[in-house]
Image: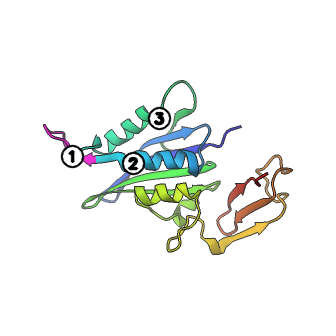
Amino acid sequence: MGTGGLVVFRSVHGGQTSVYACVYFQCDGYWTSLGVRLGEFLESCVLVNGLGASNPAGRVCNGFDCLVAQFIAAFKTGPGHLYLFPTDRKLAMEFVYVVECREDPDVILSVKTWSSGQPEDEHGAKSMSPSDFRAFCERNGAEAAEGEAPCAPDAMKTVETCEAMQTVDTCEAMKTVAACVPKKRRRVSRAED
């Protein structure tokens, strides 16, 4: 069974929010896989408003809608694995990534993420620049010294057993379970052998 990831692309302009795509990844949705790849993709993008004879270096995206289309084209490599979900889907999955483009007044691209949470967990998630987001994912969601993780460290507690985890089917291999108490978010880490 794979670890699902949900990538949502939305734009906020003049107070109006528009969801462009809700992209479901059937497996490898965790931060160190899909998160890092999404961060690298976003860092490589250069958003422009109109194409000309000389475009900037990098992955040129003629607006946010072009960026979303290029993301799908780059990540959909064959049958299965990546699916488009209805844009009104609840933001609940093992790992959720929200890529947001704000156009008030400058274009600002940001990413929010959380794991094993519910849609209301977005309100506690921190917006990060694409480069900060990639670095966060490379640390497997670990907190930077001066920053904040989507699940604040002071809300974390460690439990030695996983009987309380209703979403985990097999607990024998689990030694440490970190649960984000106030938001019902849970991170599960497998013990190293």
Whether residue 88 is situated above or below residue 190 in the rendered picture: above
Q: Is residue 118 magenta?
A: no
For mark 2, give the secondary structure.
helix
The location of residue 56, given as percent across then percent down, is: 21, 45
Answer left or right for 99 relative to 164. Answer: left
Tell me if label 1 and label 3 are in contact, CB under 8 Å: no
Whether residue 60 is situated above or below residue 109 in the rendered picture: above
Answer left or right for 105 relative to 176. Answer: left
Q: Label 1, label 3: how many angstroms apart (C-alpha)?
A: 24 Å
Q: Residue 42 shows which numbered tag?
A: 2
Viewer-nearest of discs 1 and 3: 3
For mark 1, give the secondary structure.
loop
| Viewer-closest of 174 and 64 | 174
Q: Residue 78 shows which numbered tag?
A: none
The residue indicated by pointer 3 is 75
For the N terminus, which image quadrant? top right
* Residue lying at 63% horizontally and 71% vertically, measured from the top left: 153
Whether residue 48 is situated above or below residue 160 in the rendered picture: above
Q: Which residues are magenta?
A: 47-56
Q: Residue 49 shows which numbered tag?
A: 1
Tell me if label 1 and label 2 are in contact, CB under 8 Å: no
For mark 3, give the secondary structure.
helix
- Answer with mark 1 or mark 3, whichever residue precedes in sequence: 1
